[in-house]
Amino acid sequence: MSSLNVTMRKRGILRSEYVLGDGPTEIGLLRTSGLFRRRCQLETPRERYVFSGDGRRTEVLGGQGAPIGELRLGWTRLQGDLVRPGLPTVTWRRAGAWGLECVFEDEAGGPIVALRPMGSWVRNGASVEVAPEAAARPDLHLLIGLAFYRMVRQVAAATTGTEV
């Protein structure tokens, strides 16, 4: 897998905005809102998505506000499926029970995108590894953004004692 050094830095102490960048290039903006950061908007140069959900289900809305998919987590919340009408199911899973590392896999179980936090992930970001055959996927930014959203939700849950 090839590696991108995607950083995620928070804008301001009180703001819930995170800039996603690949070196000096900004590739997206993640804005969280709502009680316990349950709603998130991802803006990339090409697309806009909204993620909204509770502990086990995250609805994915496209740029026009129409539902385009849903991430459905299992009861352990260690893995789940991103289900989108007319597209193959993509599996999301945490790489371990305690860490923030996660991966999206295709139907055959092959990795598409893997996120590995680097130290304090809010300050240092994460290493994003992309499978060479996945680099041209039209949903690559969606998968990276959704993985970061799950990281934000996990940290919010850990600090507030709420469900992820």
Image (cartoon, helix red, strand yellow):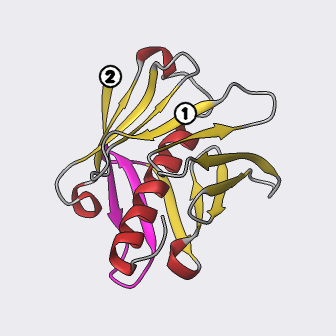
Residue in the picture at 74% in, 37% down: 84
Vertical arrangement, residue 61 with respect to residue 136, above or below? below
**Which corner quadrant of the image does residue 159 belong to?**
bottom left
Image x and y of residue 158, in percent = 34, 71
What span is in magenta?
A: 6-26
Q: Which mark is residue 4?
A: none
In the displayed structure image, the side of residue 87 where residue 47 appears, left or right: left
Residue that label 2 marks: 2
Give the secondary structure at mark 2: strand
- Residue that mark 1 sits on: 91
CA distance separating discs 2 and 1? 20 Å
Residue lying at 20% horizontally and 60% vertically, measured from the top left: 120
Outermost residue, front direction?
Answer: 75
Membership of 162 in magenta stretch: no
SS category of the residue bearing label 1: strand
2 or 1: tag closer to the N-terminus: 2
Instruction: Return the residue found at the far bottom.
Output: 14
Q: Amino acid at mark 2?
A: Ser
Q: Is residue 48 above or below residue 115?
A: below
Amino acid carrying mark 1 in the image: Thr
